[in-house]
């Protein structure tokens, strides 16, 4: 007998020069159990949660977004359209990827320099966060007037309220996504999702070899 799924809405924020792997790696895990994918592949999971995450890819215009590398990315919705949704539903999860250039029920995930983008909104004030280690010193300097505690050695950082999650550079987004999926659903399901995409993940957020690589510790 089928069970009606509770559907959560995920917004992936696209913009010119975005780093594709920043969001694509995370979406292999988070987007893998959308309602459509569960209909197709749900039989592969023994510990599937009674919920789904349905993504929308947002941009300022409906035109393809040129990323840092690779073909243009076609958004599924504009920011204006998202604000005018007739069903009145907000997004439950927001993923902000990086590039070279709060509602208490919303979860915000950033990858790489996406935390720098988020810092500009003021949402990181009074919070702990991390970012791409190659850009770490520059970002700390650029945001010195904000009340942000930047963590130099961290694969990812999650604040105590579990609403804002920030990952280090690029591939760290997959480790963050696995940790978030464990929190958002359950560990057994998250492990199944990891196994299906054969991800060798860092499970300790403090296991960060690139902090010493860049001389930050």
Image: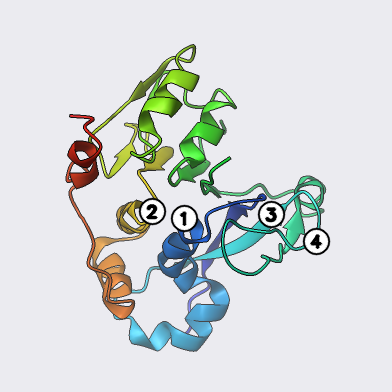
User: Going from the N terminus, do you reach mark 3 or mark 1 first?
Assistant: 1
User: Going from the N terminus, do you reach mark 2 or mark 3 first?
Assistant: 3
Residue identified by numbered label 4: 63
Which residue occupies 38% across, 41% down?
Answer: 132
Residue identified by numbered label 1: 22
- Residue 98 lies, in percent from the top left, at 51, 46
Q: CA distance from mark 4 to mark 3?
A: 11 Å
Q: CA distance from mark 1 to mark 4?
A: 20 Å
Helix, strand or loop at disc 2?
helix
Q: Is residue 186 above or below residue 169?
A: below
Query: Looking at the figure, which quarter contains the N terminus?
Result: bottom left
Q: CA distance from mark 2 to mark 3?
A: 19 Å
Which residue occupies 22% across, 67% down?
Answer: 200
Looking at the image, which is closer to me, 41 or 134? 134
Label 1–label 2 contact, CB within 8 A: yes
Label 4: few (<14), some (14–19) or many (≥20) C-alpha neighbours in 10 Å: few
Find residue 163 and name its label. Answer: none
Left or right of 116 in this view: 121: right
Label 2–label 3 contact, CB within 8 A: no
Q: Residue furthest top?
A: 145
Please indicate, yes or no, whether residue 144 appears anywhere in the rendered image.
yes
Label 4–label 3 contact, CB within 8 A: no
Label 4–label 2 contact, CB within 8 A: no
Find residue 58 and name its label. Answer: 3
Residue identified by numbered label 2: 173
Please indicate, yes or no, whether residue 128 appears anywhere in the rendered image.
no
């Amino acid at each position: 007998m089928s069970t009606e799924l509770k559907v959560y809405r995920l917004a992936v924020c696209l913009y010119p020069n975005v780093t594709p792997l920043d969001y694509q790696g995370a979406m292999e895990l988070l987007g893998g159990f959308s309602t459509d994918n569960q209909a197709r592949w749900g039989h592969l999971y023994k510990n599937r949660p009674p919920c789904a995450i349905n993504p929308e890819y947002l941009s300022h215009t409906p035109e393809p977004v040129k990323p840092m590398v690779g073909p243009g990315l076609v958004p599924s919705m504009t920011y204006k359209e998202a604000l005018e949704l007739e069903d009145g539903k907000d997004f439950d999860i927001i993923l902000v990827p990086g590039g070279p250039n709060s509602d208490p029920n919303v979860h915000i995930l950033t990858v790489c320099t996406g935390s720098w983008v988020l810092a500009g909104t003021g949402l990181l004030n009074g919070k702990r966060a991390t970012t791409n280690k190659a850009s770490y010193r520059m970002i700390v300097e650029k945001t010195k007037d904000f009340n942000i505690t930047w963590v130099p050695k961290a694969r990812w950082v999650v604040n105590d309220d579990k609403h804002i999650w920030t990952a280090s550079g690029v591939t760290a987004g997959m480790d963050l996504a696995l940790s978030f999926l464990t929190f958002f659903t359950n560990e057994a399901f998250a492990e199944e999702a990891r196994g299906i995409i054969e991800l060798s993940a860092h499970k300790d957020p403090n296991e960060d070899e690139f902090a010493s690589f860049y001389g930050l510790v």
